[in-house]
Image (cartoon, rainbow, N blue to C red):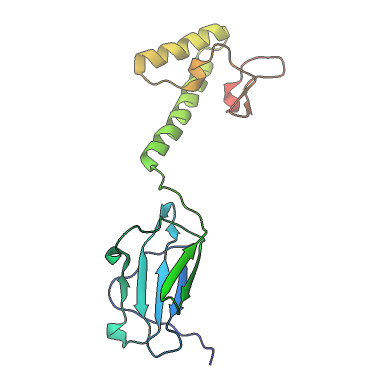
Amino acid sequence: TNQFYEQTTAGSRPMARKGHKMIARRFRSNDTQLVLFGGHNQDTPSNDMWILNVMREKSERRWARIDQYFEGQKPPTMSYHSMLYSERLNQIIVFGGLHWNETDLARSDVLRNVDRRCLKKAQGLVEAEVGKEEVEFMRMMRAACYETAFCCDIGNQTVLPVYYEFIRIRTEDGALNLTAI
């Protein structure tokens, strides 16, 4: 009969994830196994494979990671793929899906923070130097770059454009307005 019931397991288990696939193997016997492959948690992709013998006693019902015992080339990390089991071939077949390399969060944060700090510095110069010429402002941005080794793209511009990163930084009459960023 079709019923839902919770299967508790002992020992370690796969990390929480989404985009993975799970198949039932030997489901017509009294030795049913669940096989889990791939998926991701946040930006951490996986290519691990786990197996669970569903019909075992609770104390023996454990997830076991099996990909570390495979010989040869392993599939890449993937999510949202398709997976099936061929009884005739006694093989699991995986195809399609998305693959990516894990984001280098430290590098990503550095780049994002450079943009934020740069714009904050530019806004501070505008507020502190009200009434000065734009050429003087750009000179100060470049000086700040050389003095602190903290440079940003806006300081490398010869003449600031109307739009900077899709945001209008000039007023209708052409005046610089970095507070819009």
Relative to 134, is 127 above or below? below
Q: Which residue is depicted at the point 45% across and 85% down? A: 27
Q: Which residue is depicted at the point 36% across and 39% down? A: 106
Residue 148 pos. (x, y %)? 35, 18
Of 130 and 29, nearer the camera is 29
Q: Is residue 132 visible?
A: no
Residue 122 pos. (x, y %)? 50, 20
Residue 180 pos. (x, y %)? 60, 27
Numbered marks: total = 0
Of 131 and 149, nearer the camera is 149
Q: Is residue 91 visible?
A: yes
Q: Residue furthest bottom?
A: 1
Left or right: 12 in relation to 140:
left
Residue 150 pos. (x, y %)? 39, 21
Q: Which residue is depicted at the point 51% across and 11% down? A: 138
Of 125 and 153, nearer the camera is 153
Quarter of the image where the C terminus is located? top right
Q: Which residue is depicted at the point 33% across and 70% down? A: 13
Relative to 103, is 58 above or below? below
Residue 9 picture quarter: bottom left
Residue 103 picture quarter: top left
Q: Residue furthest right?
A: 172
Relative to 115, is 29 above or below? below
Relative to 83, is 154 above or below? above
Q: Residue furthest front?
A: 89
